[in-house]
Amino acid sequence: MALAPKAIALNDEGAKDFAADDLEHAEAKLGLALEYNPHFTEAWVNLGLVEMRLGHLLVARHHFHKAIELNPDLPAPFHGMGLLDERIGDLEKAEKNYRAALKVDPGFGPSRVNLARLLFARREFDGAREHFLRLTEVSPNVVEGWSGLVEAMLRLGREHDADDVLDRARAKLGEKPQLVLLVGRRLIRQNDAPSAIAALVPITRDGNTSVQASAFAWIAVAHAALGDIGASHEAAKHALALDPQNEVARYATRIETNL
């Protein structure tokens, strides 16, 4: 059955409201879209995402299940289930759902990112490297694929390969904050702490909170390498104010002598 133009318009408007964090209007518009057509799979997924952000987890699960029942050949409903499973801490089920989304569509970038991230978090660095590498192939403009690939290669002790990937990513995508962060870390590895600080300071003001926190944390490490423990601890405090769980910043607060 063809979708009513009004249903499509309401779904699109609801998705925009969701992106703007206007959850009340998003919920209303997506509900209306489904009144126009209760078989509108994309609207069920979008409404599930809204309900999940509102904390209505059982309702969100129902909506994702409904979307899967209507069309099991779309990756987005499985991805939504994966997000929900992560939200409640069931990482095994989340991984299964991300893999299910990729089985439907190997080019579905969001599930590829999240699967690689889960593998990296449990220290399966070669598996993470494989999926980040695949992401650079299917979605070459997604910076998380390149930055994740560099991170995985560093954890595998492949510094030369990591540096090569970083340079290719910068040539392709420009000086994205996530890549500048990796440049700063490389400069620290090369014992050029002053250049690392100069590279990292701009992204403490430009980038998402996670990038900003990481920039401050590595600035703290760079200051410690220069023997300026006071500046190191100050930068680490800025990092922890943004991300209390930042491990690099926590490490920097414990530094009492020159590295």
Image: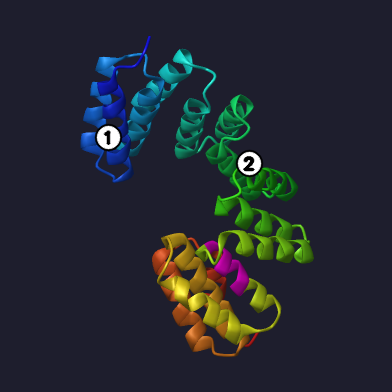
Q: Give coordinates of residue 53: x percent, y percent.
A: 34, 38
Quadrant location, the C terminus: bottom right
Could you say where residue 159 lies in the image, as x and y percent from the top left? 76, 65
Q: Residue at x 56, y 84 (%)?
A: 223
Residue 36 lies, with reference to residue 24, above or below; the image says above
Q: Which residues are magenta?
A: 178-184
Residue 111 vs residue 165: left or right?
A: left
Which label sits on residue 88?
Answer: none
> Which residue is under mark 1?
13
Q: Quadrant of residue 243?
A: bottom left
Query: Mark 2 — residue?
Result: 138
- The amino acid beneath tag 2 is Val
- Separation of residues labelled 1 and 2 (CA atoms): 28 Å
Which of these two is toward me, 233 or 204? Answer: 204
Q: Secondary structure at mark 2?
A: helix
Q: Nearer the viewer, residue 43 or 239?
A: 43
* Left or right: where 53 falls relative to 245: left
Q: Is residue 12 left or right of residue 192?
A: left
Element type at mark 1 = helix
Task: Choose top left, top right, bottom left or bottom right for residue 11.
Answer: top left
